[in-house]
Structures are given as structure tokens and as C-alpha cells.
Image: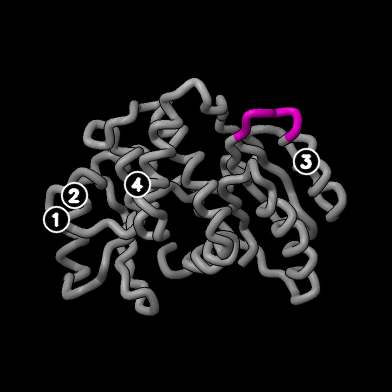
Amino acid sequence: MGRAYEYRKARKFKRWGMMAKTFTKIGKDIALAVKSGGPDPTTNGRLRAIIQNARAANMPKENVDRAIKRAVSKEQEDYKEITYEGYGPHGIAIVVETATDNINRTVANLRSYFSKCGGALGTSGMLDFMFDRKSVFRIPAGTIDLDELELEMIDFGADEISLDEEAEQIVIYGEFTAFGAIQKHLEEKGYELKQAEFERIPNDTKELTEEESADLEKLLEKIEEDEDVLNVFHNMR
């Protein structure tokens, strides 16, 4: 796992290239976090992590505060988190995480994207066995010893730690259910959280030719441009 799957980062940066789209996504994340855990980041770990992600994306503090206030107001749309699964061209498994206030619109759009690009939207849960859902944290590398950090974090649910030399960051992978414990420990120890999120890591990847990859890219771009889509995961190598 680890470095072998850091390719996801490049896709995410490409998708988040437009600042407005990034801020819109974070705004939805804030709304969902406030709905599930309240507007106080000191008692809502998920909200606290999203606020840190907003800082990393250079989202102005006033935008974050406005999103939190909106989330507790009657003006806030009632977003629902729904995950869709299907197969793209050449048998590539795709998982799409969405936050939507109109399920009919979202599923119709996704079905259209898959169909037009030679894929098919499937049923919920059909790809669960192909992906592991993980908690992922990124902290500045600095002078941290990886081996010592791994020994320190294993008791809190971390199962792999790797160094992203290009970004000068340490990437910590943990079980999905360990998010809160890992986050709490990192904060208590004074580590700077650059990013904290959930990812779906494929258990096995499939290699495509250049032409086949281009076919898949067309579908992924359509999905990622949809305003209801939060994250897209696949098993193309």
C-alpha cells in the first residue's frame, strides 16, 4: 500500500485545481460534519479535521466560519452522503462518494456518465470487497524518525507509515474506525496536521494500455466535474 497508492494525490490535486470547486467541496464537508457532530470543533473531531484541510487549501477563515454558521441555519441544504459503485470501461472498478440534496438528479447524472463512456453503474455494496476504507493523515516530515513514529502510532490504530519525499510529508494510514484515536493522539503530541481524510484503497489494481487509460480518463473527468461528487476512487494502476 503506502507509496504505491500516492498516485491518488495527483488526481485529487487536478480535480481540486479550481479554487471555487475546492471551497464548495469543503463547504459540503463542513455541513455534513456539523450535522453529525455539532458546530463546535473542540468537541467535533471530524469538523476539526475539515477545518485543518480548509487551511491547507488556503480557504479563508471567514469562508469557513460562514460555512459553519450556514450549516446550523435553516438555509442549509439537507445533504445526504451516498456512495455509488460501478465498472468503467475495460473492467475498472469505480467508487463515487457524493453529497447531494437531490438523489434523483445525482443517480441520473452518474448513470449517464457511465453509460456514455462504456461503463455501467452497479448496485450498492458490490465493490466493498475490492477496497479497504482507511483513515489517512499527513504531517510535515521535518526531522521525525519514521520507525519511532510507527511504534508510537501502532497502538492507536495506524497500520502503515510512509514518507512522501516530494511533498516532504509523512503519510499515516490507519483503520477506518481508528480515525478519532489517531487524530486525537497526533493533536495531543503537537504534530501539525496538514490533511486528515478517508480514502478507499484498492486491494488489487489493474493495468491498462495508454489507449484504455484514455477511455477511463474521459469517464473520471465527467464524474469529477459533477457538483454532487466529493471523491472518486478506482483500481486502475
The amino acid type found where label 4 is placed reads Ile
Give me the disc on residue 190: 1
Residue with the mark numbered 3:
109
Rendered position, 217 above or below 101: below
Badges 1 and 2: C-beta atoms under 8 Å apart? yes
Give me the disc on residue 35: none
28 or 119, which lies in front? 28
Q: Residue at x 79, y 57 (%)?
A: 89
| Structural crowding at the residue carrying mark 4, measured as other residues with C-alpha within 10 Å and reported as few (<14), some (14–19) or many (≥20) | many
Q: Position of residue 103 (x, y in %)?
A: 69, 28
Residue with the mark numbered 4:
51
The amino acid type found where label 2 is placed reads Glu
- Tell me the CA gap for discs 2 and 4: 14 Å
- Tell me the CA gap for discs 2 and 3: 40 Å
117 or 40, which lies in front? 40
Q: Position of residue 59 (x, y in %)?
A: 41, 55
93 or 107, which lies in front? 107
- Tell me the CA gap for discs 1 and 4: 17 Å
SS of the residue under disc 2 = helix
Badges 1 and 3: C-beta atoms under 8 Å apart? no
Q: Residue at x 47, y 46 (%)?
A: 26
Rendered position, 107 above or below 136: above
- Tell me the CA gap for discs 3 and 4: 30 Å
Give me the disc on residue 187: 2
